[in-house]
Each structure stands twice: as C-alpha cells, then as structure tokens.
Amino acid sequence: MSLHEVFTACSRAGRAALLGYLPAGYPTLPRSRELFTAMVRGTGEGPGCDIVEVGLPYSDPVLDGPTIQAASGTALRSGFRVRDLFDVVSSVASAGGHPVVMTYWNPVHHYGPDAFARDLRSAGGLGVITPDLIPEEAEEWLAATERHELDRIFLVAPSSTEQRLALTAKASSGFVYAASVMGVTGARDSVGAAAAGLVERTRAHTDLPIGVGLGVRSAEQAAEVASFADGVIVGSAFVTRAEQQGPEGVAELATDLGRGVRAG
Amino acid sequence: MAPVRDVSGTENARAHHRDKAVPEGHDPDERGHFGPYGGRFMPEALIAAQDELAAEYEKAQRDPEFVDELGRLLRDYAGRPSLLTEAERFSEHAGGARILLKREDLNHTGSHKINNVLGQALLVKRMGKSRVIAETGAGQHGVATATACALLDLDCVIYMGEVDTKRQALNVARMRLLGAEVRPVDTGSATLKDAINEALRDWVTNVDHTHYLLGTAAGGHPFPVLVRNLHKVIGEEAREQALALTGRLPDAVAACVGGGSNAIGIFHGFLDDPVRLVGFEAEGHGVDSGEHCATLTHGSPGTLHGARSYLLQDEDGQIAEAYSISAGLDYPGVGPEHSWLKDSGRAEYQPVTDDEAMQAFRLLSRTEGIIPAIESAHALAGALRLGRELGPDGVIVVNLSGRGDKDMDTAANYFGLVPEADQEESQ
C-alpha cells in the first residue's frame, strides 16, 4: 500500500489518518521493535496508527523539544547506527504497518541520498519526512526519491508565504506535513489556531493530503485536528507513553487516538 | 587613506578590486551558495525570516542613513579604525619576519565581534523587531550582543553552553550587568554547538518578534555573507595600514578559525592580492586524541546549523563533539565560505594545538605586553610557524581578534599562576 492508498482508504472511511512517531532504537533496538509493533497494532480493541513515522536519532535535533531530544540521545547512547534504521523499518512493514522515516538531513547527506533512498525502499519504507530540507536544496533528493519510488514529504509552517506553500506542495508527494505552530516538537495543551488556517491555505495549492503535527497528545485534540486535516501526527506523547508504560502504553495511546480521529 | 597602487604584485587583479566602490566577484549565488557550500539547510518555518533579513540588508546597504549610522557607531562607539601594531620583540621568535598585529582586541568590548553586532542590531531596529537572541562560546559575541542591545534598547537573551559559562564566568557576569538574560545550555556537549541548537529552537518559536543575531559567518543564507560583509572592514583597514607602514603588501595574513568570522573579515581585504591567506584551527589535544575542532583540516562536508560546509562528524553523519582550550573555537563546523576557499586553494588552513597556542599566548604577553584571547593565540602560534618559513624578509599580518582578559582563569590554571597552585608547589 502506498501512502496515497492509505490516505484514500481513511478518507473513504470518512476519517483522518493517524500517524505516530517514535525514534528508532529507543530505548534499545529490540525494545524499539516492540514499541513500533504496538503502535501499528493498537490494543486489539481498535486499530493502531495508519502510518508510522520512524525517527532517525540525530545528535543535533534542532526542531525537537526536550522529550524527543532526550529519547534520541538515549537511542544513540544505546548504540543505534544508521544501518539499524532499515531493520526497524522492515519490522514495521512486517508487522503490517506503513512506515515512513523522519530524519534530519545530514545523516542522509552523509549516507548518500541515492543509497539512502534505495536501502529504505528495499526495507519497505514508503516515504521520508525531512524537517530541515527545503525543496530548493533538494535537487539530488528529488532525483533519488523519483528513482527509488519513495514519497518525499516536505514541511509547511504558519510563516510560509503563499509562494512557498505552492513551491513546497509541488515538490512533495504522499502528503504535506503542516507544522501546527511555530516551534519545536512537544505535547501542548492546545494545538495552535494557526493550524486550521495553514491547512486551508495549503489546500489552495495542492490535492495532496495534509497531515498536521506538533503538539497533539490527546484523543480530543486528535478529533479537533481531524476535523480539518487529512492526517493527525503524534510524536512526543508516544515517546512519553513509551518511557512510562512501554508497549502496552503505546498500544493504548494508539487506540485512544484512533478513536479520536474517527470522532473528528 | 594613502594611495595603494604603487606596489608590486598582480596590478590588474588589484586595480580591478580597488577601483570598484563595492568589490564584487566573491559573493555567493542568489541562494547563498559558495560553490557546493552554504545555502539553506534549515526548517521551512525560518525561511520567511531569513528572506526578510536578506531583503532588509539589501535595502539597508543602499540606504545612506544606514551606512552613515553604522559608520558613525563603528567610529565613535566601537573605536574604529583599530590599530596595526608592529610586534618587534615577538617577531624575533618568528624567524625575524615582521609581524603586524591587527588590533581588534582594542575595539569596544574587546574583540572583532562588535563589528557584526552593531550592523545586525541596526537591522533589527529597521525590521521592527524588539527581541534579540544569540549564542556565545567564549562570551565575546554574547558580550558584544548584550552591549549593542543595551545601546539600542533591545531585549536580549544569550544562550551559552554550561561548560562555557564556567570557563568564562566573568563574561557571564558582564552580560548580566549589561541587562541580558544568560541561559545556560546543558544538552549535548554543553558548548557552542548546543548553544546554537537552543537558540534555533527559541528562534523558531519566537521568530515573529525575535532576531537571531548569529555571531559568526556561518548558518543559512544570508548570514555567511552578511556577517562577512560586516567584518570586511578589518581586512580593508589592515591592507591600507600595512601598505602605509611597510610600503608593500604582506606575504601572509594569519587568523584563527572557529566559525571563521574574524578570518573571513580580514581575508576579504586581500582576496585579490598575491597574499597567502592562512587560517589556524584549534587542534586541541592533537588529532590522535580525538579531542580537537580542526574542522577544515580533519573534517568532511555535511550540513549543520543551516549550511553545507566542512564539519566534524562520525561515520553515520552524527555531529562529533568538538574540543579546544579556547571556548570561542570549540565548534564542529565552520562558515561555508572557508570551505569554498579551502577547496579552491585560495586560502589554506592549518591546525594548532592547545599547547602551541598557550605558548604563543604567553610569548605575546611577555614580549609585547599584550595579552591576547586564546582564540587569537592560535593565529599567533601560526604566525610564528609562517615567520620561520618566510625568514627575515617576510611580513605577516595577524588578526589579533580579541583580548585575553576573559581567559585569565584558563591561563592561570594552565600555567599554574593561581595562588593555590603556588602553595601546593611549595609544600
């Protein structure tokens, strides 16, 4: 199933897609596989995440708040290597999930964009979210993702001009990632009012689905975002749940949020 | 200014350079690329602010009011032009080559950093923003930023690695006295790189009313060209002063390179001249120790903090932790134009260890009565090396980018100058 097909299926079911994020290798590689499986499957009383964002832990995550910074650091200290990413992606795919990778650009640059796209595709990855790569700098990446049939998901932000929304949406495939607020990742009490406006502005430039991330942590917030977006992206809340309650907690949150996107 | 065309060298290249009111030919492309380096590897959320800054700077450069105001501040507030001092006794240790010191240490706040800060702070006012954030390593850029913010009535928050707040406690007090809030950063290696990460997180959250006053010629476009242009005055003055003093161009220009702002500033005065441009990077405890920050010498290309450039990274592209005795050089990246100058061969970059730098630090203090910043001592150590290569006919301009008052704790510990150490030794 491609990302397009996942979003289409959700849309036919009259709901938004749920996207869950965790860093690969957190807290350890084996434990990380269990957490992702829980995220995909949910509790059994309800399905889990429609799409799983596998984060590549990075030394300098400038767009992440304290929760994901700390988790990335834990993964790196427990010995995570970039090559392990592909194993984790494979395990998500074999658990029936739809994996995309979320990564800062330097590890991809260093691995070689073409080799990265090739290895990710053969591991079952469907796309890549690149929070610090803008389309103007992505020439090599556009070619690599074309060649290996990977979706490339760029970000738009409340500060994006119309011109940049158009340019970014045009360069994207799979979906467009809309940052709900100006800021870094982390659970928030309320998702910015800017989010609905940004989604609306972005829709004027594209037919691609639009996922909203940054700040969502509860079923209520998921329902709210689901009312205007095609995808609800949850990161830090999953990390916190994984830390406190392990796979059971992650499964519960996935199912709970899944109810949220169905209510939206 | 003295006429400068009656000197030996490549007349055409220099005439081309000097006859233009605004020298051209060394600017990046319109998206900030110096060859394969530079650009913008940064979040979409910040692109609008970078565009705004670039546009405002374009306008300001053509606005006589801005140009005059910056010129006035540099002259009447910062104390420009800075002196060029011949270091005769120090030169005796450099194979007899004449060493001329460009005295950026005599600027207000004690380093070259004030040039950049005054220019950017004026741009902040023009953009109608009220809050400034900045990173600092040694504290020199933080102090300069806090100073400009006090002068121009701007709110100021400085991010500083926790390790550095200890190494440079005096500068922390200085910034606080000037009205800035200093936020220690305890993530990662708790040094300059991590302070920049935290400043970027603040910026992306508060960008509507906040300017990130980046302290070095690195980061996403337009910062590398903006910061460079604000420091070009160093090289332009040094060139005129060296010609006036010696009647010819120097053989070499030496500067320390961390992010590389003082080096790019002085290099730019000599880019079209037949003059060797040599940047000296901090090699800490030596390359074999793994504890260094000689990015251009030992690093490889990658993206960090908004630009593609050389950086120190492991085999997975994770950024390495840098080390230097000098907090201001302790950075695993470098400005993109330096990467371009290295690859093109126009500039060369050599490593200097902690020990070499500290010997030069003491030597300048004892031969000239000038205590340099430990950052600048790397350039001095390099000049000793260059001088021995060039011999008695050589002339070297060294960018003495800062004064060493802030480094007295480090120096006292290194040389055992503290009273406690004396007591221990005598027991």
Image: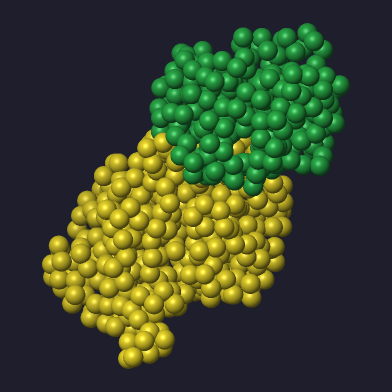
User: What residue lies at 53% left-to-right and 36% top-to-bottom?
Assistant: A28
User: How far across and down, in percent of the image, does residue B56 sit?
Assistant: 62, 47
Name the one closer to the observer, B96 or A173: A173
User: How far across and down, in percent of the image, does residue B408 sit?
Assistant: 43, 78
| Visible residue check, residue A206 | no
Q: Tell me: B396 left or right of B306.
A: left
Residue A160, above or below B215: above
Residue B146, above or below A69: below
User: How far across and down, in percent of the image, does residue A5 sit?
Assistant: 66, 9
User: What residue lies at 58% left-to-right and 74% top-to-bottom?
Assistant: B174
Name the one closer to the observer, A195 or B273: A195
User: What residue lies at 59% left-to-right and 52% top-to-bottom?
Assistant: B198
Residue A233, above or below B265: above
Name the one closer to the observer, B44 or A62: A62
Residue B274, above or below A168: below
For chain A, give the colour. green
User: What residue lies at 42% left-to-right and 58% top-to-bottom?
Assistant: B330
Quadrant in which the C terminus of chain B is drawn: bottom left
Q: Tell me: A59 left or right of B291.
A: right
Q: The yellow chain is which one?
A: B
User: How far across and down, in percent of the image, does residue A246 sit?
Assistant: 66, 35
Name the one closer to the observer, A249 or A96: A249
Coloration of the structure image: by chain
